[in-house]
Every structure is written in C-alpha cells, then in structure tokens.
Image: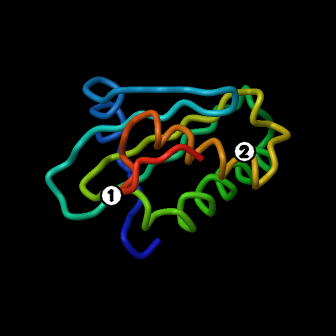
Amino acid sequence: MKFSESLKKNSYFQNVYKNGKSYSNRFFVMYVLENSLEKNRIGISVSKKVGNSVIRHHITRLVREAYRLQEEEFNSGLDIVVIARVSAKHVSYHETARAIRYLGNLHHILKNDTKS
C-alpha cells in the first residue's frame, strides 16, 4: 500500500465509527471519515464470530490486497474501516474486490466515480 497506511489505534477506529458514514453490502460494512492527511488510512476488523484465527486472517489479507490493488482509484485523505460480516467467511478474492469497489462507489470516494 504505497499511498496508504494502517489504522491501528482503537481511538482512531472509535472516531471513525462515531463520526464517519457507513454503507454495507452482503459481506462487509465500510465506514469512511475524512482525515487531515494527504494519504488514506485503512483499518480492517474481523470479529471472532466470523471464524477462527486462520479464517479471520485470511479475510483480512483478502481485504488488504483488494484495497491495495485498487487504491489508486480511491480519493486521498480518508480514514476507511472495513468490517467483515459472518457471510464473508467463504468469500473469494474477486467477490472481495468487487465488494470493496462497490462500497467505495456508494461512498463516492472513487476518483472516476463510475459504476462497475
């Protein structure tokens, strides 16, 4: 992720939950809040309800990779938190990439802002 960094502190996550706007689909919920930085910060949350640690880390890697490959299409200066739902347990990479792009479209944070 050359344009982004990870959102790590709990207080940052709580700020995005409290002040950000959210949209969701079958697999994920995405919260977005503008920050005062030139780059995006992305946080990924996968609950124990979704599965064991292997499944949770697999979903985290899928989301991070899907975002990394599409990050040039996202506007800068955003805090983004992606929360995995239980239905994301068996999600494929292509479904993940489509879902992340779809949620970015709903938030109007894509640079070209077109439908996919």
Along the line of sight, the residue nearer the viewer: 18 or 102 = 102
11 to 20, vertically: above or below: below
Q: Secondary structure at mark 2?
A: helix
Q: Amino acid at mark 1?
A: Asn
Q: Amino acid at mark 2?
A: Arg
Q: Residue furthest bottom?
A: 2
Find residue 7 and report its horizontal and vertical position in percent.
Answer: 38, 52
The numbered disc on residue 56 is 2
Q: Secondary structure at mark 1?
A: strand
Q: Residue furthest front?
A: 114
Residue at mark 2 to residue at mark 1: CA–CA distance: 23 Å
Task: Give left or right: position of 78 versus 45.
Answer: left
Q: Residue at x 72, y 44 (%)?
A: 56
Q: Residue 87 falls in which quadrant of the image? A: top right
Task: Give left or right: position of 1 versus 10.
Answer: right
Q: Residue furthest right?
A: 90
The numbered disc on residue 10 is none
Q: Residue at x 63, y 38 (%)?
A: 46
Q: Residue 6 falls in which quadrant of the image? A: bottom left
- Of the image marks 2 and 1, the number of the one nearer the N terminus: 1
Find residue 15 and report its horizontal and vertical position in percent.
Answer: 27, 32
Task: Give left or right: position of 76 versus 69.
Answer: left
Along the line of sight, the residue nearer the viewer: 87 or 70 = 70
47 to 61, vertically: above or below: above
The numbered disc on residue 40 is 1
Q: Residue at x 80, y 37 (%)?
A: 89
Task: Give left or right: position of 49 versus 116.
Answer: right
Find residue 49 and report its horizontal and vertical position in percent.
Answer: 73, 26
Is disc 2 surrounded by few (<14), some (14 to 19) or many (20+) residues within 10 Å? Answer: many
